Amino acid sequence: MKTMIKSLKSIGILLFLFLLNSGFEIYSPGVVYSPSLKTKNDLNMSVSLAAPVSSWLNIGAAYAIDNHTGLMIHGISNNVNHKGAVTIDLTNTISYSNTNTSINKIRMNAVEIGAGCFYSLGRKKNRLFQLYGGIGGGSGSDAYVDNDLLKYMVSSKFYTAFLQTSWAYTGKYFESELDLKANYVRIYSFSGIIPYEYDELHTIPYMFKDLNSSGICIEPVYTMKVGSPSLKAIFQFGLETNYVINSPEYEYNWQTGTSSLDIAALLSVFKVSIGISFTFRENDFKH
């Protein structure tokens, strides 16, 4: 019994060490979308592909409603299915179609909306300060089977709140930005199954449902844009550091008992993305 309780506590620790950008891909913030609006009626749209540690497809759009205020929307999508399919029924059985190969199915879709201010500075007005904040939400899942053995299957629903700032140089053919984004993440429905081998002879099909957790994601990144006045290639790289504020209480059904565990985990990963940015500036067409 003591061995069982100790093993289940180990599961709780592993769940949330893996929760953000490690073993489980159920949440990732994607790229830091920085629209670089400068004057009223400026419009920016961008599409970026991020490295596997982050969400693959990122689409952003922003519009300047006056000379210092902008609105933005940013969508994130990651749908990957490698070699087969896996379906988990948490109340009944586990089934998957497989022929001694690995299966990895990852899905995450999210959207965030925000508003903020921007100011062009300097004698040539080629220095730009930006400050945006907003909210978002989405869902994600990750399942992995290796040689007919289920390793894990997890899913989540979450909402977010973010604040980001940047200092940029904006030229006609080249832009350079330093961005810093803080993202509060609340995972309000975390469910799944993880077979856990607690000794050489026994494996627990550990199931959990509707658990809660929260954390803060800090993203310092550098963004470079090169091209024409309207169309530029984007290259972004930086760090993604996640601090888990709390892990949830969980219950186990082994004879009797409940347990709870609060941990703090600091996880950092390197991120990189490439993309295309289109900017329409009304002032560029005035003579």
Image: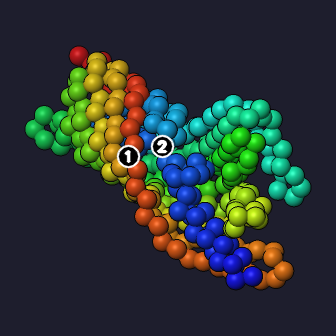
Mark 2 Cα shell of 10 Å, populated few (<14), some (14-19), many (≥20): some
Where is residue 70 shown, x and y percent of the image? 40, 43
Which label is found at residue 50? none
Q: Are marks 2 and 1 in contact (CB under 8 Å)?
A: yes
Where is residue 108 shown, x and y percent of the image? 62, 43
Residue hosting label 2 = 53
Where is residue 252 shown, x and y percent of the image? 76, 74
Instruction: Give the residue type at disc 1.
Output: Phe
Pick the front one: 248 or 203: 203
Q: Earlier in the sequence, mark 2 or mark 1?
A: 2
Residue hosting label 1 = 270
Instruction: Give the residue type at disc 2.
Output: Val
Q: For the point 57% across and 69% down, which residue is it?
A: 13
Q: For the point 35% across and 29% down, which residue is it?
A: 234
Helix, strand, or loop for circle 1? strand
Where is residue 238 shown, x and y percent of the image? 33, 45
Q: For the point 38% across and 46% down, which residue is it?
A: 270
Q: For the point 77% across and 34% down, which residue is it?
A: 98
Q: Is residue 6 above or below residue 77?
A: below
